[in-house]
Image: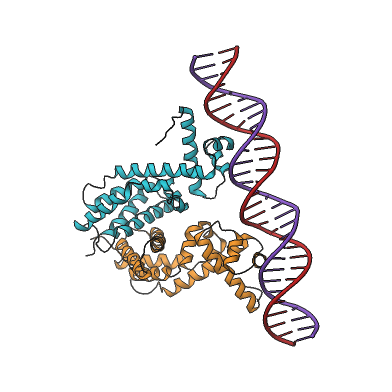
Chain colours: A cyan, B orange, C purple, D red
DNA sequence: CCGCAATGGAACACCACTGTTCCACTACGG
DNA sequence: CCGTAGTGGAACAGTGGTGTTCCATTGCGG
């Protein structure tokens, strides 16, 4: 991916800026570059040294997002077990993405970034849902594309619930998975 | 609410501006006042004549939003029938709010507007869920505050699904209600 | 037809953010 | 100890949105 090697120092600074951008933009998508630089404990000049324009920074954030998302998808092992079980694993892994989830909802046009098309998830996700339809663990009336929307919206619901109410991360994850499990279960 | 009566003409213009603001801001919360004025078929000067500052316009939008939300809540008759049935009615009514749903998600700080506290929903909603817990139509493991988050996130999922996929409004409403019904149903 | 309400356009100062340049400072390896 | 990589601050012009003022135009009721 990276064509030119960077020194350890530069790589660390670059990473700190991207991480700060994710955190700040998640809370306020209209945040100025100055705010992001401050959050990264870096001068605005330095930020511009790594990302000449705002759009360059957003591209860097998108790339980092795709990488984390792909890692999480891999850990979920979508091709193992019954469909609903794999979905449960995916939900748990994505839930741990934290700030990144908020950012994806706050900056929807970030998903339309070219780098996003390199995402691993979509095909495997559809295969997983098809398996769930076949093995009777997922309601056949709910298409894969819809379940994708449901998954993301529930993750968002979980994180906003965490922010607004005084509950533990673990409890919220329990609510999210229980809700999704019920939603996808075939009707009796 | 309105202390000074306005002429029919002024009331109409004011309403057109608020409506245009809802539509434009729903798509792009960072839209300029010029864009909103254009969408309302009104000069920017006229817009400033009705809403001196941007914050005044946002307050007007918030007030309109609360009004529509309260009307929808009223139509749902939360105090009738079993808990899950009332929730289904509420879901259907809110789904028809359309643009306003997108706006509420795009401008979360709009919900923190002072006018929002005059909302009808919260108490009735909690009573409805409590009734559902008692009559066995809603999973007792899911608290009312969480179901509130679930309802809103599913409405958002429905509208974004409608925007991204080629499906009818009616079909999407079916998916949303089926998903919520499954999510809140007590486990077997 | 007059007068007023309502409007739109042009022009203006103001402000925050952006992107850039230049210079000074620090740390670290050879 | 010197040179270089990495950094931060100050200053600058450019840009786009904001809020305001002023004036011309339209339309409608008396």
The answer to whether residue A105 is visible is yes
Quarter of the image with the C terminus of chain A in it = bottom left
Seen from the viewer's position, the closer of residues B20 and B52 is B20
Seen from the viewer's position, the closer of residues A121 and A93 is A121
Seen from the viewer's position, the closer of residues B140 and B30 is B30
The answer to whether residue A95 is visible is no
Residue at 28 percent across and 59 percent down: it is: A184
Rendered location of residue A24, percent (x, y): 51, 45
Toward the left, the furthest residue is A135
Q: Is residue B30 left or right of residue C23?
A: left
Total labels drawn: 0
Quarter of the image with the N terminus of chain A in it = top left
Rendered location of residue B164, percent (x, y): 39, 60
Rendered location of residue B93, percent (x, y): 41, 71
Q: Is residue A138 left or right of residue B7?
A: left
| Snapshot quadrant of residue A180 | bottom left
Seen from the viewer's position, the closer of residues D26 and B42 is D26
Residue at 42 percent across and 42 percent down: it is: A63
Query: Can you say whether A1 is above or below B57 in the image?
Result: above
Rendered location of residue A106, percent (x, y): 47, 52
Residue at 38 percent across and 41 percent down: it is: A67
| Snapshot quadrant of residue B64 | bottom right
Query: Can you say whether A188 is above or below B81 in the image?
Result: above
| Snapshot quadrant of residue C21 | top right
């Amino acid at each position: 991916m990276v064509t030119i090697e960077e020194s350890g120092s530069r790589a660390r600074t670059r990473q700190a800026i991207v991480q700060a951008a994710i955190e700040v933009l998640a809370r306020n998508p209209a945040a100025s570059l100055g705010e992001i630089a401050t959050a990264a404990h870096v001068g605005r000049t330095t930020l511009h040294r790594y990302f000449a324009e705002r759009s360059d920074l957003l591209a860097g954030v998108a790339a980092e997002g795709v990488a984390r998302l792909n890692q999480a998808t891999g850990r979920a092992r979508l091709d193992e077990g019954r469909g609903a079980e794999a979905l449960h694993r995916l939900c748990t892994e994505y839930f741990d993405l934290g700030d990144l989830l908020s950012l994806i909802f706050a900056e929807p046009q970030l998903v339309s970034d070219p780098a996003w098309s390199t995402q691993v998830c979509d095909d495997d996700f559809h295969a997983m849902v098809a398996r769930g339809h076949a093995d009777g663990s997922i309601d056949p009336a709910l298409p894969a594309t819809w379940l994708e929307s449901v998954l993301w919206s529930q993750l968002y619901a979980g994180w906003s619930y965490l922010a607004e109410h005084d509950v533990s991360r673990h409890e919220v994850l329990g609510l999210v998975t229980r809700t999704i499990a019920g939603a996808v279960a075939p009707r009796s």
